[in-house]
Amino acid sequence: MTLQLDSDGHLRHLLTLDGLPREILVRLLDRAGQIRDTALGRTCKRNSLVGTTICTLFFEPSTRTRSSFQIAAQRLGADIINFEASTSSARKGETALDTLRNLEAMGVRGFVVRHAEDGAAEMLATHAGEGTTVINAGDGRSAHPTQGLLDALTIRQAKGPDFSKLKVLIVGDVKHSRVARSDLHALHTLGTGEIRVCGPQSLLPDDGVLKGCVVGDDFDAMLEDADVVMMLRLQRERMEEGLVSSLDDYHRDYGLTVQRLRRAAADAVVLHPGPINRGIEITDEVADGPQSLVLRQVSNGVAIRMAVLETLLA
Ligand code: ASP
């Protein structure tokens, strides 16, 4: 996507990891890695975005993404406002684009956008004013680039920078998952040795996004020797009826239990983007167990979002 790069090849918006040049992706990971150690302490306040106003423009619910963008912006010294669709004129029918234009007129320069429609962030970036930056915080089932980056950072911290020997398994409701798409783009760009994708046929996409992956529906077989297991939430809000026969069946076939995890490499790590359906795609013992990096992902989210905001807006 060229829209997100300016004519000199610098990042202007962050809309997708699809086609994002490897050096830009790695630079974001490096920058976040440097920030990471100090990002969670109180003393890490930086002033790189003093005088810049950022808005989290969310038309869908969020816990982690919105909070971590807010914390990241504050740690960079920016002013941050939160637009909440349910308590705004969006309820009176105002469009996302009119909302953005009005906030631009108040001097907002950075928009962190979440929307249920595919392509919403790209549409806003296309129509945004000259100095405005749009960051996609999740659009429909298309992309969630900062999640893809924080997952890549989490894997890199656990397994080192060489992804070429890694077997990474993505499991579950891939069809409805923007996280899976952004993870796939990041894993391909970083040269991952083997990318496996597993889920019931009804929850696997057929739009070409799984090209280059080993795809299967037998979770136990796909787990063999995996180094990284990335679990996904069953996204019932995006699902037509009947794609999953029952939650019990789903858990039996695709739920990650301690016993199942033994099939993976002994030092395998487990990721999940949250929110977790405990007892459905993952058990408490695994989610809270020694191989889980779930909260590490959340911490890394702040560092990644600081790196992204600084790169785009400082
Ligand atoms: N929080 C992530 C997202 O917004 C993952 C999920 O909702 O399952 O896409």
Image: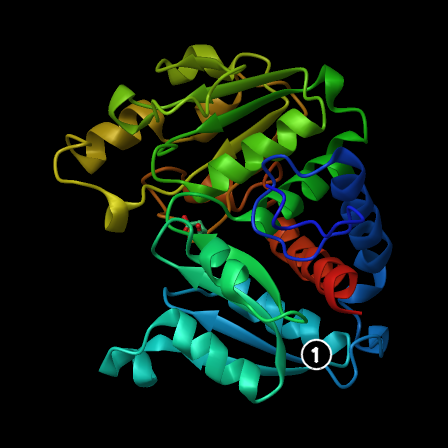
Q: Nearer the viewer, residue 72 or 132?
A: 132
Instruction: Please give left or right for residue 255 compared with residue 4 in the image.
Output: left
The kind of residue on which mark 1 rests is Gln
Q: Quadrant of the C terminus?
A: bottom right
Instruction: Please give left or right for residue 57 compared with residue 2 in the image.
Output: left
Identify the residue shown where x is 47% and y is 65%.
63
Q: Can residue 152 be seen from the camera position used here?
A: yes
Percent coordinates x, y for residue 36 in the rendering: 79, 57
The single residue placed furthest to the bottom in the displayed view is 106
Identify the residue shown where x is 80% and y is 24%.
162
Q: Nearer the viewer, residue 136 or 244?
A: 136
Q: Quadrant of the N terminus?
A: top right
Q: Nearer the viewer, residue 101 or 53?
A: 101
- The residue carrying mark 1 is 74
Instruction: Please give left or right for residue 247 compared with residue 121 in the image.
Output: left
Callout 1: CB less than 8 Å from ligand 1: no
